[in-house]
Image: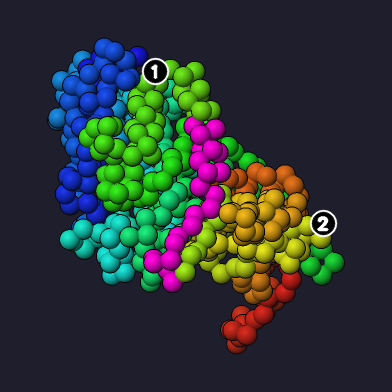
Amino acid sequence: MISDNLVLVFVHGWSVTNLNTYGQLPLRLKAEAAAIAPTVTVKDIYLGQYVSFHDEVQLHDISRAFETAIHEQLAAEIADDNRFVCITHSTGGPVVREWFDFYYNKPGASVCPMSHLIMLAPANFGSALAQLGKSKISRLKSWFEKVEPGQGVLNWLELGSDKAWDLNKKWINGEGGEIGGNGIFPFSIIGQAIDRAFYDNLNTYTGELGSDGVVRSAAANLNATYVSVKQGPVVYTQGENVPQAMTVDFSIAPKTAFRIVKWKSHSGTTMGIMASPKESAAGDTPESVQLVEAILNCIKVSNVDEYSALSATFDAETEAVQQLELVEKVSAGFFLHDRYFIHDKFSMVIFRIHDSEGYPITDYDLIFTAGDNADPNHLPEGFFADRQQNSISPQTVTYFINYDIMNGDAGVTYEGNELRPSLPGAQKLGLKVNPRPDSGFIKYVPFEIAADEDFLQKVIRPNCTTLIDICLQRVVSKDVFSLISYDGPMPLDKDFSGLEPDNDYAS
């Protein structure tokens, strides 16, 4: 049950240096607390402040300091079993998730003092902007304020980072045990509108479709998939190294409440999801009123059944918003002439490739295939939006894929003009990996997942991320080490510096 004396804790995003980042949302929620229940009042509001602009500060360091701050400032509330509601923005979502996972999501841990985690535009799987580096990203008005941003947190936020992978993989495989009255109720809310005032012509990610200008909808959504692909042992048969049976296992994250709200972008007082709501609904936009209602509905949830019902409602509302915002017309003035943007649904797929001994594989060709013949030329034109290799862990690469084009589309017409004809899409999807080295004393053997409908439907999901963990067999030539038998004097003059491997391998 929700306490009548509600405690709200706000946690801001990365590179913030001023508490005005929260705007008037805290006061608005305090004023409308009665909408949760007639007896509910907001007892306390805590505005978090943390340092993210020093290179040595890692995201986990912030979560550790958050634990200390909670127990210092909320000691009386915790002693009375009055759990707080946390509302985060952007990087604040991963910070609090990391804190919850490290301190409370483990056997024997006490009940988390946080009951609800309401994440606004959370970078749960990172942001494409993070790889731009401090010098470039510091120019972006949507993230930057007065100080040079910190590299430590940026490393976590880079798409495909090891820390983000580990946290999200654990969530996917958690089977929902974290969600509920003894755990937490998590919610992710994001917009998909672009505030053109923040658009940077040198960094087109700030206008990327399928995002709010900073965070992709798929990167905010915790309804993710984990795919484990393991290549079987390799045997030498008829002049070729042939891998044995390959296993492909799928894990689906527990159903988590996710909502795309209308006409909201990442930052700013005009469209920003955190800073744009006004103190009073009377002077606010309809879009901000709906956003605040969504937040209040999250706070109302007190059991798993209510959580499941709100999750279903959010799904329907997300579908309605994406239909309503399908076409964006930007009138002449910002551009030289009218322009139309089709806001399709997108998917994000993150690959990590390593070998059976745990070594990363960083040199490879990764090729999608489609159709009955598993041919990359049969992929629908325009399905591919972006590819980004992690700069620290190059064995990890993130693909951003247009879900609607990949799956086929009935066509888009706006104001009587056909903006896009109907598209057939790919009926089947497959994958080929050509790793290197493919010869020598240590090598790898290519593998392929044949194109089929099941793989397409499980991997490419709207507004979602899929982690694909690929393990290839490390093939070691038996000539790396050999024993020379002799009968007589030691063959000290034998030179094996020019030894070449044959096709046989070590067991």
Q: Secondary structure at mark 1?
A: loop
Q: Is residue 176 left or right of residue 78?
A: right
Q: Which mark is residue 429?
A: none
Q: Amino acid at mark 1?
A: Ser
Q: Quadrant of residue 336?
A: bottom left
For the view shown, which residue lies furthest in the right direction? 238
Q: Mark 1 or mark 2, which has the lower sequence index?
A: 1
Colouring scheme applied when the structure was drawn: rainbow
Q: Total marks drawn?
A: 2
Q: Residues within 10 Å of mark 1 (few under 14, many from 20)?
A: some
The image quarter containing residue 415 is bottom right
Look at mark 2 in the image and give the residue it sits on: 372
- Is residue 181 visible in the rendered image? The answer is no
Residue 456, image x and y in percent? 69, 49
Q: Would you place residue 385 above or below residue 427 in this image?
A: below
Q: Residue at x 71, y 61 (%)?
A: 379
CA gap, disc 1 to disc 2?
Answer: 49 Å
Task: Give the percent coordinates (x, y) of residue 422.
Answer: 71, 55
Where the C terminus falls, by quadrant?
Answer: bottom right
Q: Of residues 115 and 395, which is closer to you in this image?
A: 115
From the viewer's perspective, is residue 113 above or below residue 224? above
Circle 2 packing at 10 Å, graded few (<14), some (14-19), many (20+), is some
**Magenta span includes 199:** no
Q: Amino acid at mark 2?
A: Asp
Residue lying furthest front in this view? 416
Which residue is under mark 1?
Answer: 302
Magenta stretch: give its range: 314-336
Q: Nearer the viewer, residue 336 or 139?
A: 336
What's the residue at 85%, 67% (across, down)?
Answer: 238
